[in-house]
């Protein structure tokens, strides 16, 4: 059991030693913090209902409580954690590790867009 724990820790160490993984995770964390920071800073400026579901038919179906904006950083963080747990499990397949890490980055960037759009509608 001790040997398996040491081998798992060495996998985590090799994951962090890869420069591209460190850079991607750094940018993922920066984007998640930016999402959360933007929502917190501008939260009092939002009306009680905001158009969050823009893919739905125009009108009341697009509206959501302004507190729903907090779901975007939460989903980004959750997806990042799940993807990196899978990356640790699948550490032998380098392509999948990169794919999971880049997917987390893309999702975080795409989750930042509605936050910026909402700020642009109500603040600017």
Image (tube, helix red, strand yellow):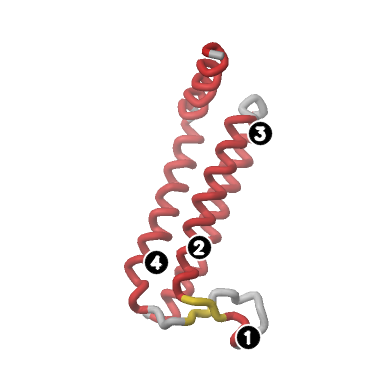
Residue neighbourhood size for the residue with mark 3, other residues' Cα within 10 Å, grouped as few (<14), some (14–19), many (≥20): few
Indicate the secondary structure of the residue bearing disc 3. helix
Which residue position holds label 2?
71
Q: Earlier in the sequence, mark 3 or mark 1?
A: 1
Which residue position holds label 3?
95
Q: Earlier in the sequence, mark 4 or mark 2?
A: 4
The image quarter containing residue 59 is bottom right
Return the mark for residue 100.
Answer: none
Label pair 4/2, CB-CB below 8 angstroms: no
Viewed as shown, does residue 25 lie left or right of 42? right
Return the mark for residue 58.
Answer: 1
Q: Earlier in the sequence, mark 2 or mark 3?
A: 2
Q: Looking at the picture, how far across and down is residue 38, in whole percent?
A: 37, 65
Indicate the secondary structure of the residue bearing disc 2. helix
Viewed as shown, does residue 95 lie left or right of 44? right
The image quarter containing residue 63 is bottom right
Residue at 39 percent of width and 79 percent of height: 46
Which residue position holds label 4?
39
């Amino acid at each position: 059991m001790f040997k398996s724990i040491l081998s798992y820790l060495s996998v985590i160490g090799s994951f962090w030693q890869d420069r591209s993984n460190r850079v991607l995770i750094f940018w993922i964390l920066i984007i998640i913090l930016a999402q959360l920071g933007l929502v917190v800073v501008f939260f009092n400026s939002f009306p009680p209902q905001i158009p969050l579901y823009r893919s739905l038919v125009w009108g009341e179906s697009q509206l959501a409580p302004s507190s729903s904006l907090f779901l975007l950083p939460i989903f980004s963080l959750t997806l990042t954690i799940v993807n990196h747990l899978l990356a640790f499990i699948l550490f032998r397949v380098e392509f999948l590790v990169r794919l999971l890490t880049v997917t987390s980055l893309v999702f975080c960037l795409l989750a930042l867009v509605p936050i910026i759009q909402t700020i642009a509608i109500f603040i600017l």
